[in-house]
Image (tube, rainbow, N blue to C red):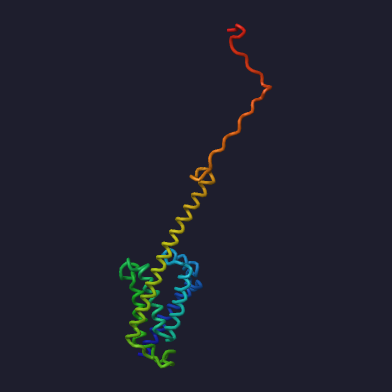
Amino acid sequence: MTAGTLIIRLAVGGLFVGDGLQKLRGSFDGPGLEGTTQMMHSLEMHPARRNAVAAAVTETAGGAALALGAATPVAAAGITATMITAIRKVHWNNGLWNAGGGWEFNGLLIAAATAVVADGPGLLSLDAVTGKKKWGIGWALASVAAGAIASTVLIEAGRRAAVEQGSGADDNADVDADADADADGSGRHAGPAETPPPVAVDEATPELPTQGTDGAS
């Protein structure tokens, strides 16, 4: 099974490296870090920039580690975390099948990474150099659990940050509205209206004659 595991590692790990570089550097016509940040913002994964960097680095490093067979359970946990997050935030409501935008492909990648951990990366791996050519089902399930927990923590943190940012924006809007009201004099804290100065009477102005004093009609 060494050859088969190696093929899976190289294929799945290589794809994740490419996907991560798309997000991190815009390689392979990817969105780059700015585009990934905008995507995170639209998904309410706040802070968007930090989550964009985390996703890009996790996919790149996790894919590379899986391809090399290095710290395979950790690599699989990182891959699982990104895929569960994608499923929950993007694909879940679309159902299973990929044709309708569902989570079929993401689930397949999670299964492949988990299978590599269960059967081990094989002899042609860095783990085998340290005596860990096979991890077992316990480590495989642990990698899935770790990925699910990490995804849940990140999604919940993003949701709370989005709520806090929304509250902060509302407060700033109220402050701006009060400032504008004070500036145009319509605010409730506006001072009393100033009394206009008295109009000076020009003593040199002659008085108009009163009608009828000279008998004219």
Q: Nearer the viewer, residue 147 or 42?
A: 147
For the N terminus, the quadrant is bottom left
Q: Nearer the viewer, residue 103 or 189?
A: 189
Position of 166 relative to 1 (above/below): above
Indicate left or right for 186 with 115 as reference.
Answer: right
Total number of numbered labels? 0
Quarter occupied by residue 71: bottom left
Q: Position of residue 161 (x, y in %)?
A: 43, 65
Q: Position of residue 47 (x, y in %)?
A: 46, 67
Q: Position of residue 88 (x, y in %)?
A: 35, 69
Position of 20 relative to 202 (above/below): below
Indicate left or right for 137 with 11 as reference.
Answer: left
Quarter occupied by residue 196: top right
Q: Nearer the viewer, residue 19 or 168?
A: 168
For the C terminus, the quadrant is top right
Q: Nearer the viewer, residue 17 or 208?
A: 208
Quarter occupied by residue 202: top right
Furthest-top residue in this view: 215
Furthest-right residue in this view: 204
Q: Position of residue 149 (x, y in %)?
A: 36, 75
Position of 101 relative to 6 (above/below): above
Position of 115 relative to 52 (above/below): below
Indicate left or right for 144 with 180 as reference.
Answer: left
